[in-house]
Amino acid sequence: MIPAAGRGVRLGPGAPKALRALNGTPMLIHAVRAMAASRSVSLVVVVAPPDGAAEVKTLLDAHTLLPGGATAGSTDFLVVPGGDTRQESVRFGLDALPPGFDIVLVHDAARPLVPVDTVDAVIEAVRDGAPAVVPALPLADTVKQVEPASEPGGPEAVVATPDRSRLRAVQTPQGFDRAALVRAHETVTDDVTDDASMVEQLGLRVVTVPGHEEAFKVTRPLDLVLAEAVLARRRLNDGF
Ligand SMILES: Nc1ccn([C@@H]2O[C@H](COP(=O)(O)OP(=O)(O)OP(=O)(O)O)[C@@H](O)[C@H]2O)c(=O)n1
Ligand SMILES: C[C@](O)(CO)[C@H](O)COP(=O)(O)O
């Protein structure tokens, strides 16, 4: 499932983030291709901006989605309208998921360049029995815990420096046993930023697999520059 219903406020004014172009192709199309590149992915559910489902269907029809130039094959596509929060969008996607799919991957449209090996590693770990799996990377920076500033723009007091060796930055796709993910979305009411933390709240085991630096999230304007540079490098190295 690809939640793609966010506005992209941090990226600045413009179309919904997932529909903005990276080297001429909408970010969402890159993300769909990244997932469809896995032989294990047989259905992609795209959660579109609430009023953009028709536009997303048109885009999916207009682009080659599968590796090797195929336009149809073992991967099917479904588009559903999203909600006001990422959590709500994922729930709408889950509600629309047909029976017969026991493993669900949730992948941000905003991480369009995730390599297929990362996708496959997540699937493998769920198949091996983990109810929830997250790709994770060590942190490049030291992290500080702060108290909120007493006035807007004022200094924040540092209260702790967590042991960085035990912290991870997590990415998507996050992989789930479908029943665990559905239960998490039925049970957890806190507003959280990722699905794995909902499964954590059920007390189920969440494990990591190695993340990838190219699976970064396009969040701020500089990330667009980086994404286009990665695509240009791939074109040079791989010839596509
Ligand atoms: N109501 C929402 C909000 C977010 N998302 C999706 O969740 C993913 C991760 O969210 P993020 O990158 O934070 O996207 P935005 O919410 O669009 O970003 P911002 O907070 O800057 O507006 C994105 O693929 C985004 O489209 C979604 O499907 N529905
Ligand atoms: C799911 C996620 O991409 C994992 O890093 C992240 O939590 C999304 O958070 P955001 O607040 O929507 O950027």
Image: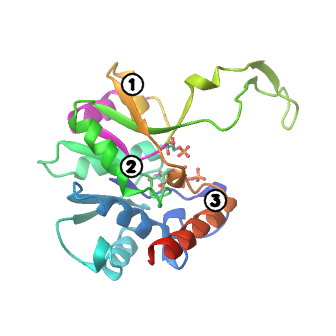
Drawn side of residue 105 relative to residue 215, left or right: left
User: What amino acid does circle 1 point to?
Assistant: Glu
Whole-percent x, y for residue 133 in the image = 35, 35
User: What amino acid does circle 3 point to?
Assistant: Asp
Q: State the residue position of label 1.
A: 200
Asked if residue 162 is positioned above or below residue 5 in the image, the reply reads: above
Confirm or deny contact between disc 1 and disc 2 (CB under 8 A).
no
Q: State the residue position of label 2.
A: 118
Disc 2 or disc 3, which is closer to the eye? Answer: 2
Q: In this picture, which residue range is highlighted in magenta?
A: 171-189
Give the mark, 1 or 3, whose residue is nearer the N terminus: 1
Task: Label 3: state its secondary structure.
Answer: helix
Quarter of the image where the C terminus is located: bottom left
Whole-percent x, y for residue 105 in the image = 31, 47
Task: Label 1: state its secondary structure.
Answer: helix
Q: State the residue position of label 3.
A: 223
Task: Report if residue 82 is visible in the image.
Answer: yes
Task: Report if residue 177 is visible in the image.
Answer: no
Asked if residue 240 is positioned above or below residue 132 in the image, the reply reads: below
Drawn side of residue 78 relative to residue 225, left or right: left
User: What amino acid does circle 2 point to?
Assistant: Thr
Instruction: Farthest residue to the front: give it.
Output: 237
Disc 1 or disc 2, which is closer to the eye? Answer: 2
Whole-percent x, y for residue 50 in the image = 42, 61
Q: Is residue 217 magenta?
A: no
- Distance in Å between CA atoms under marks 1 and 3: 29 Å
- Distance in Å between CA atoms under marks 1 and 2: 21 Å
